[in-house]
Amino acid sequence: MTIVEAIKEVLRRYPNGLEFEKIYDEIVKTKLYEFGAIDPKQVVRSKLRQHCVGLDFPSASPTKHFYSDGEKGKAAKYFIWDGKAQPIKKSDVERPDRLPEEIIDSKHKEHLSQIKNQMMDFIYKADYGFFEKLVIKLLQKMGYGWDSKKSGLHTGGPNDKGIDGVIYLDQLGLDKVYIQAKRYKVDSAISQSDIQKFIGAMNTQGASKGVFITSSSFTRLAIEEASRAQLMKVILIDAEKLSELLIKNHLGVSVSQAYEMYTIDSDAFIDR
């Protein structure tokens, strides 16, 4: 019997739920599992959290068996999840019972949010030409273009005819991606007419692939307009997606510190 199976066996006997310490006491008392850990109560707690619906952190299991009543610390009760009941969600501040890896994951997401905000602030303060060149570099970093440095052309300016840049997918320029970049403030969404102008500019070029990138967002009508484009594919990238891609491709950011997270490899402790 595994620890998870032992926990489930105890909770079947207590349908009104139990705290993790009492679950541990019941496992020991009924001899369902023999622990070898230095702090076996924390092993039970860890297994409960890793298999608890509503909790998602790096070492969490995709298979869920339990749910919590959302109470604080040691007072939190756990129950067997029937696959239907909705877990009670509480803010991170209200959940001191979290595992260290949960806290790290939560703080990492908070860190990414701060970096995205700082990144977009720099973009807002830069000139339009910089933004247009930045998105060309981003697409090249993502692998578009026959050469990581030579395949991008910045065409933006007073007479750009609705096209701010071109990525040449092959060395002869037979296949291209056309780019429109709009450095708008967050409260100024890209409209349907903006998309129509871009599609019109692409039609003039006989283009089949286009990317519209903005530092703001797209209205619902703008998204629908892009989806209706005939004989061409138009991809829309808003501020949230743009910041994610910049971070993922290490453009405008550098890694200052990396932390390794570990999970136990149970097979390594089996003498085969």
Image: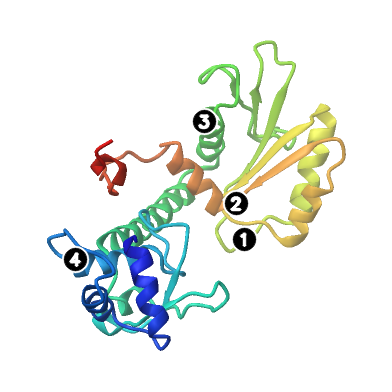
- Upstream in the sequence, badge 4 or badge 3? 4
Tell me the mark number nearer the camera, choosing from 3 and 1: 3
Q: Amino acid at mark 3?
A: Lys
Give the residue furthest to the right: 230
Structural crowding at the residue carrying mark 2, measured as other residues with C-alpha within 10 Å and reported as few (<14), some (14–19) or many (≥20) = some
Residue sitting at 53 percent across and 54 percent down? Answer: 240
Q: Which residue is mark 4?
A: 40
Residue sitting at 38 percent across and 76 percent down? Answer: 91
Q: Which residue is mark 2?
A: 238
- Upstream in the sequence, badge 1 or badge 4? 4
Tell me the mark number nearer the camera, choosing from 4 and 3: 4
Mark drawn on residue 137? 3
Give the residue furthest to the left: 38
Tell me the mark number nearer the camera, choosing from 4 and 2: 4
Quadrant of the snapshot with the C terminus? top left
- Whole-percent x and y of residue 31? 24, 71
The answer to whether mark 1 and mark 2 are in CB contact below 8 A is no
- Whole-percent x and y of residue 32? 28, 69
Mark drawn on residue 38? none
Q: Nearer the viewer, residue 64 or 173?
A: 64
Instruction: State the CA–CA distance, disc 4 to disc 3.
Output: 52 Å
Q: Amino acid at mark 2?
A: Asp
